[in-house]
Amino acid sequence: MTGALLIVDYSNDFIADAGAMSCGAAGQALDGNILRQAEQALARQYFVFICNDEHHQGDPFDPEAALFPPHNLAGSWGAEIYGQTGAFVRRMQEQGSDRIVYVPKLRYSAFFGTPLDYLLRSRGVDELIVAGVCTDICVLHTVIAAVYEGYRVKVPADCCATIFEHGQEWALRHLRDCLNVEII
Ligand code: ZN
């Protein structure tokens, strides 16, 4: 069996200063840490899954439209992976790595309505390391879904951030104390 790093919503819209829903400095501070996790994952022959929101301009059937400003619109700058992490992922792809897998997500959980579970299982993945934002929204929902599917999950605390005050601490504690997720 093997493992995968899931990088959740580490996009310009969620991280860059000009992003539509930016975590700001807290999100930008993760870049080097997530990059290190990605490098380590590939060095261990793990996979790196890029699980970003993919919304569509003016979609009246998207439930997030009632809650948040437009973000991660398909094909936009805002939907691209941020920073050094993004540059690394794109470089690996250009070099033909079959260890980088894109799974655009529909809702907070990267598992909901996507082939993520199938793609992980078909590669023999049983351990997940989940990084990205927001800790108390998409990271939380994705990790809960992963636990329900039977994956062993680790969350590096220095690779997650959120836009909500108190959300970081609450979400990590919930994952640790209620779901037995290893916070590393
Ligand atoms: Zn979204």
Image (cartoon, rainbow, N blue to C red):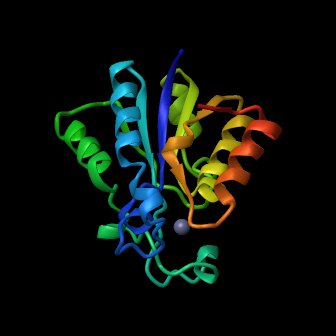
User: Can the viewer see residue 174?
Assistant: yes
Residue for point 42% across, 49% down: 30
Q: Quadrant of residue 116?
A: top right
Q: Is residue 158 above or below residue 16?
A: above
Residue 171 spot, x, y in % from top left: 70, 51
Residue for point 42% across, 24% down: 46
Q: Is residue 23 left or right of residue 117?
A: left
In which quadrant is the N terminus drawn? top right
User: Can the viewer see residue 132?
Assistant: no
Q: Is residue 47 above or below residue 52?
A: above
Residue 109 spot, x, y in % from top left: 62, 53
Residue 125 spot, x, y in % from top left: 54, 24
In which quadrant is the C terminus drawn? top right
Foreground of the two, 32 or 92: 32
Residue for point 76% across, 31% down: 180
Foreground of the two, 106 or 71: 71
Residue 110 spot, x, y in % from top left: 57, 50
Q: Quadrant of ligand 1?
A: bottom right
Q: Is residue 122 left or right of residue 183?
A: left
Residue for point 29% across, 42% down: 89
Q: Quadrant of residue 152?
A: top right
